[in-house]
């Protein structure tokens, strides 16, 4: 946390990346899902990762977070090698993700879910007595998140009974309950009605400037509105990288997107 | 459930039921041994509820822990000293250690290994206990264990009043402990792991150590149940490791409903009482009636099996302000 004290300069790439991969590789049998990917995420980044379906975006997030073991290469968080660190230890270091397909605790309500995560976050996860209900500050933070993500009206409904849009909102609220420093968002607004998408992304964009965000998203409108840096992934490897204007003008990127039918004009 | 604060009604009901149970051996002395056995088996079902209902680990051979607790307590009484509480502690410790060792295989294995590990273990232990009959008594069972007085004062009577009270007291304390743990912040993380291990890890919960904890805790309680059966009946037979034992306790949990603290205990009581009633009328058809009862639960009362608390609670979850 202390390393955040120094103010960083938005314009240049002086500061060391908060998250970095080195020639990362993942093979599933014969398929190379991640092909020698070297990626850097700057402190406070609003970094988008785009690419057609099957490009390996989700696999990359799984490698970064430790859900899948890497085939080769390395992952550095704050320049510390975390390639073999278990999933929960990476979370403890401040790297948190959302899932493309919502992963919720089905028998718990949104309020219980958030309270338990906030409790875990505050070091209560191993306490075998007492009740979360008595932890006023935990409940307060959970309720605050419920408000922020418009979940207050369904706070006591089992999550497996929630409407799709609410499930997506909870998915993101869960990630924020973990107080991330590095946030990996795997298609967070996929399937969310158009009106609410914008709003969710605004909430995310409004996160403290120190939080570094990697966003995977298909809607180019949103990507170009949100990000200050874009990486294009195709067939598991990096096709192009740069600021939004440069990416929009890149003929190779245009070819990929025209080819896959997802047209865009920034 | 997790965030509810108001539990007076629940406390009242549980308190009342236990008061009745504690009174039974003294009001109906002929039923004292039945009460003792039912309380022990209820503790066994509680332990499975913790493992299956709260940690989501399927344990098909849960009798492995029960049997180890029974033999440990029995041998301890016979060979070392007759004090019941020390024997109980020994049974708990041995079973807990075995649970911890098993959890290592569980963490590494696939779902199928998870299911098989205790089953294999119970078969193995059955054969071992059979083979080493010089120590265990083999097929004749472990005999000649003299129990000392409880707390140095209360002799175990043949009618079973002191044993029944002892078993009930242990069950009651175990129930309080389990309730306490599952409703704590730690218990909340157990529920998270049960519901979705992938997400649990992704919010920073150490899934492996939670599973190991639940497994060892469940094994310890099963060991306590085995120790109680050994001590209150003064006898341990190979049957403590049998597949029937493991199957029966699973049935009890299905009857009472897994994943809530009282499911195992209520299921065990229902199972035992039904067994007693039916066996009194038509002993040879007990399994037939049991099967019919289970079918009825499966077909008519699925809701009751899956969400048993729905019967006692209004649909909306009570919440704190
Ligand atoms: N667990 C897996 N086993 C085998 N193949 C996989 C697995 N996960 C992903 N893949 C394959 O890896 C490639 C990249 O998938 P994915 O990362 O989900 O793409 P994206 O998120 O960019 O749509 C696809 O060809 C997919 O079929
Ligand atoms: Mg994907």
Image: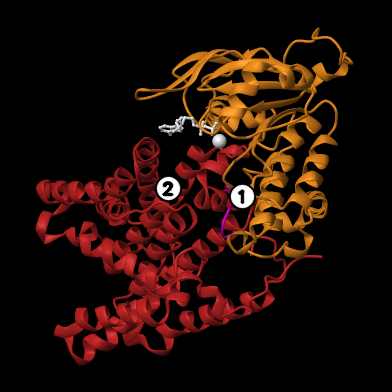
What label does residue B299 carry, if any? Answer: none
- The red-tinted chain is B
Q: Quadrant of residue A80?
A: top right
Left or right: residue A122 versus residue B242 is right
Dominant SS of magenta comes to: loop
Given residues B236 and B216, the one toward you in this image is B216
User: From the image, which quarter does the N terminus of chain A lie in?
Assistant: top right
Q: Say which residue appears at 24% left-offset and 84% top-offset.
A: B289
Q: Quadrant for residue B292, please give it.
A: bottom left
A30 sits left or right of A185 in the view: left
Q: Residues within 10 Å of mark 2 (few under 14, many from 20)?
A: many
Q: How far across and how far down the image is residue A175, in percent?
A: 69, 40
Q: Quadrant of ligand 2?
A: top right
Q: How is the image coloured?
A: by chain
The disc placed on residue B215 is 2
Is residue B143 something that shows in the picture?
Answer: no
| Figure chain in orange | A
Which one is nearer the viewer's eye here, A208 or B226?
Answer: A208
The structure residue drawn at horizontal position 23% and vertical position 51%, both measured from the top left corner, is B122
For the residues bearing labels 2 and 1, Cβ distance under 8 angstroms: no
Q: Is residue A85 magenta?
A: no
Residue in the image at 71% along x and 34% along y: A220
Local packing at callout 1 (Cα closer than 10 Å; few below 14, some 14-19, many 20+) is some
Residue B255 is situated, as x and y percent measured from the top left of the image, at 39, 74
Q: Among all residues in the image, which is located at the extreme top?
A: A14
Query: Does residue B131 sit above or below A111 in this rendering?
Result: above
Q: Which residues are magenta?
A: A103-107
Instruction: Specify the label residue A128 is tagged with.
Output: 1
């Amino acid at each position: 946390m202390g390393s955040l004290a120094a103010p960083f300069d938005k314009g240049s790439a002086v500061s060391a990346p908060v998250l970095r991969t080195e020639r990362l590789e993942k093979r599933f049998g014969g398929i190379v899902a991640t092909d020698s990917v070297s990626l850097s995420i700057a402190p406070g980044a609003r970094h988008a990762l785009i690419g057609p379906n099957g490009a390996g975006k989700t696999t990359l997030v799984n490698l970064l977070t430790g859900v899948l073991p890497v085939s080769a290469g390395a992952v550095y968080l704050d320049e510390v090698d975390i390639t073999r660190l278990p999933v929960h230890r990476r979370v403890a270091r401040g790297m948190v993700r959302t899932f493309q397909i919502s992963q919720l605790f089905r028998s718990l309500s949104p309020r219980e879910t958030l309270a338990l995560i906030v409790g875990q976050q505050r070091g209560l996860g191993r306490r075998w007595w007492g009740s979360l209900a008595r932890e006023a500050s935990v409940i307060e933070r959970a309720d605050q998140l419920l408000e922020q993500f418009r979940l207050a009206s369904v706070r006591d409904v089992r999550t497996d009974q929630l409407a799709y849009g609410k499930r997506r909102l909870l998915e993101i609220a869960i990630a924020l309950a973990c107080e991330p420093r590095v946030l990996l968002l795997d298609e967070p607004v996929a399937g969310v009605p158009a009106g609410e998408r914008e709003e969710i992304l605004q909430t995310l964009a409004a996160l403290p400037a120190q939080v570094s965000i990697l966003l995977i998203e298909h809607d180019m409108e949103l990507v170009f509105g949100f990000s200050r840096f874009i990486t294009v992934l195709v067939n598991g490897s990096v096709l192009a990288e740069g600021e939004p204007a440069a990416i929009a003008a890149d003929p190779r990127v245009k070819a990929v997107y025209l080819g896959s039918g997802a047209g865009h004009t920034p | 459930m997790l965030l509810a604060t108001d539990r007076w009604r629940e406390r009242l009901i549980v308190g009342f039921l236990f008061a009745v149970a504690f009174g039974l051996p003294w009001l109906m002395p002929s039923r004292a041994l039945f009460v003792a056995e039912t309380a022990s088996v209820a503790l066994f079902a509680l332990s499975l509820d913790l493992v299956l209902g709260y940690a989501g680990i399927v344990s098909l051979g849960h009798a492995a822990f029960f049997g180890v607790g029974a033999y440990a307590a029995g041998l301890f009484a016979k060979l070392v000293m007759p004090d019941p509480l020390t024997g109980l502690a020994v049974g708990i410790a041995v079973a807990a250690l075995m649970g911890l060792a098993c959890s290592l295989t569980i963490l590494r294995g696939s779902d199928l290994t998870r299911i098989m590990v205790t089953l294999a273990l119970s078969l193995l232990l059955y054969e071992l206990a059979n083979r080493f009959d010089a120590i265990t008594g083999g097929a004749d069972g472990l005999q000649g264990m003299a129990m000392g007085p409880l707390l140095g004062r209360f002799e175990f009577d043949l009618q079973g009043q002191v044993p029944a009270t002892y078993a009930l007291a242990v069950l009651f304390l175990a129930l309080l402990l389990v309730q306490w743990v599952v409703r704590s912040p730690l218990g909340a993380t157990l529920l998270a792991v049960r519901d979705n291990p992938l997400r649990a890890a992704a919010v920073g919960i150490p899934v492996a150590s939670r599973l190991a904890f639940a497994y060892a805790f469940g094994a310890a309680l099963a060991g306590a149940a085995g120790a109680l059966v050994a001590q209150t009946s003064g006898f341990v037979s190979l049957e403590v490791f049998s597949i029937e034992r493991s199957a029966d306790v699973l049935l009890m949990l299905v009857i009472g409903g897994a994943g809530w603290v009282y499911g195992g205990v209520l299921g065990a009581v229902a199972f035992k009482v039904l067994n007693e009633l039916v066996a009194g009328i038509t002993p040879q058809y007990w399994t037939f009636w049991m099967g019919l009862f289970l079918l009825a639960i499966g077909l008519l009362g699925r809701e009751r099996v899956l969400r048993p608390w729905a019967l006692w609670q209004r649909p909306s979850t009570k919440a704190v302000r």
